[in-house]
Image (cartoon, helix red, strand yellow):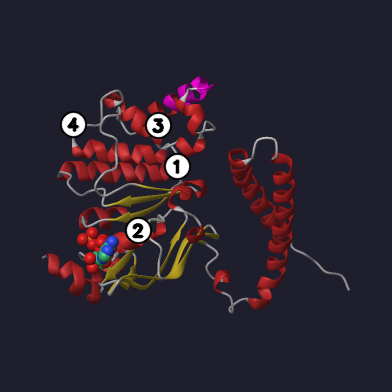
């Protein structure tokens, strides 16, 4: 009996394999032990091919199990947060929170103080380990990675209270954001062994990113002493230089003037469009959130109480009672 296999079933695992191979090559080039690389590569290739066979078999099997398996209905979401629970001693900061973010979407995460927004953000960016639940980014288990590894899958974040080096220039601060994309390691960088070309390329790239955010005038200025709004944009530039797929912004509007908030909103939309980013935004500035996002997830006391478009969330009685109403 003949078996007809759709081309897309064959093509998708191979495309996945190719992108995984590229990622693994980057890892191999960093981790390859001196003189012992061939065995490592052969072993890795064996496991890569095992994964291709496994992916292909899974493709054949999934239509039969459709409806039984969660992944089959969530295929379109890029970031998938499932049943995340975080407990700090007796405090339940997050209680089984779940949501999805689609590729290219700007998703707002809102809620009153203590709702669990920062905790959730810190779980996704791997600073906190959840007590329960899972986080997948493009099908990859983010919880299996450590905080310093998430940029390898294209996830970058900014910080609520800024995390810039005050003594470095703005340009140097931005260059730091690309450290995982360079080939020079600790010792080579320390003693500047054959790093000149790479460093000058990086400097040029950093300057280009600063220019795109209209920050070229402060490129050679120390970060210390610059206005808060400018520093917030420098943090975004530092994330952008790593070529993110997912940009996580933690309260980018806090401490900004009205005019700066408006400007920042336009910058975020512009960079999303230009770089085709997915953005996860934790923010209290409701005017900005309502104007900028396509989807909003609302947390209260660690639980998700609503999810939808800005218009849907604005009209939701539970959200009005827990959050929006109380701010009037
Ligand atoms: P805000 O808008 O004020 O930043 P939030 O929604 O970000 O609030 P979280 O900071 O995530 O809320 O805090 C959720 C709950 O977890 C709070 O009760 C908080 O006190 C608690 N919490 C957060 N981090 C820790 C921690 N490291 N240790 C103990 N409790 C914590």
Residue extending furthest toward the left: 328
Looking at the rendering, which quadrant does residue 241 occupy? top left
**Residue identified by numbered label 4:** 225
Viewer-side residue, 96 vs 211: 96
* Magenta residues, start to end: 193-203
Q: 10 Å neighbourhood of mark 1: few (<14), some, or many (≥20)? A: few
Q: Is residue 199 magenta?
A: yes
C-beta proximity under 8 Å, tags 1 and 2: no
Vertical relation: 255 (above or below) 188: below
Cα distance between the residues tagged 2 and 4: 28 Å
Cα distance between the residues tagged 1 and 4: 30 Å
* Ligand 1 is within 8 Å of the C-beta of the residue at disc 2: yes
Cα distance between the residues tagged 1 and 3: 18 Å
Residue extending furthest toward the right: 1
**Residue identified by numbered label 2:** 121
Cα distance between the residues tagged 3 and 2: 24 Å
User: In the rendering, at what x and y percent does residue 148 appear?
Assistant: 45, 48
Mark sitting earlier along the chain (3/2): 2
């Amino acid at each position: 009996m003949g078996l007809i296999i759709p081309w897309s079933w064959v093509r998708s695992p191979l495309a996945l394999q190719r992108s995984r191979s590229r990622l693994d090559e980057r890892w191999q080039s960093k981790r390859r032990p001196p003189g012992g690389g061939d065995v490592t590569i052969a072993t890795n290739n064996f496991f890569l091919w095992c994964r291709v066979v496994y992916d292909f078999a899974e493709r054949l099997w999934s239509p039969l199990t459709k409806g039984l398996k969660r992944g089959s209905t969530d295929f379109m979401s890029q970031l998938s947060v499932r049943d995340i629970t975080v407990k700090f001693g007796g405090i339940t900061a997050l209680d089984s929170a779940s949501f999805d973010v689609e590729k290219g979407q700007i998703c707002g995460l809102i809620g009153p103080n203590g709702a669990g927004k920062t905790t959730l953000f810190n779980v996704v960016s791997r600073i906190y380990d959840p007590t329960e639940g899972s986080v997948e980014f493009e099908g990859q288990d983010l919880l299996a990675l450590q905080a310093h590894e998430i940029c390898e899958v294209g996830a970058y974040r900014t910080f609520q209270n800024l995390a810039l080096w005050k003594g470095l220039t703005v340009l140097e601060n931005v260059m730091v954001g690309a450290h995982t994309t360079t080939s020079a390691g600790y010792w080579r960088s320390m003693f500047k062994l054959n790093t000149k070309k790479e460093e000058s390329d990086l400097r040029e790239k950093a300057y280009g990113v600063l220019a795109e955010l209209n920050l070229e005038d402060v490129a050679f200025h120390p970060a210390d002493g610059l206005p808060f709004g400018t520093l917030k944009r420098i943090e975004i530039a530092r994330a952008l230089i790593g070529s993110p797929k997912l940009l996580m912004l933690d309260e980018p509007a806090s401490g900004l003037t009205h005019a700066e908030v408006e400007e920042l909103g336009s910058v975020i939309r512009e960079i999303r469009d230009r770089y085709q980013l997915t953005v996860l935004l934790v923010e209290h500035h409701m005017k900005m959130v309502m104007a900028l996002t396509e989807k909003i997830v609302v947390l209260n006391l660690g639980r998700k109480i609503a999810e939808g478009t800005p218009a849907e969330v604005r009209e939701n009685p539970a959200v009005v009672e827990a959050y929006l109403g109380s701010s009037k």
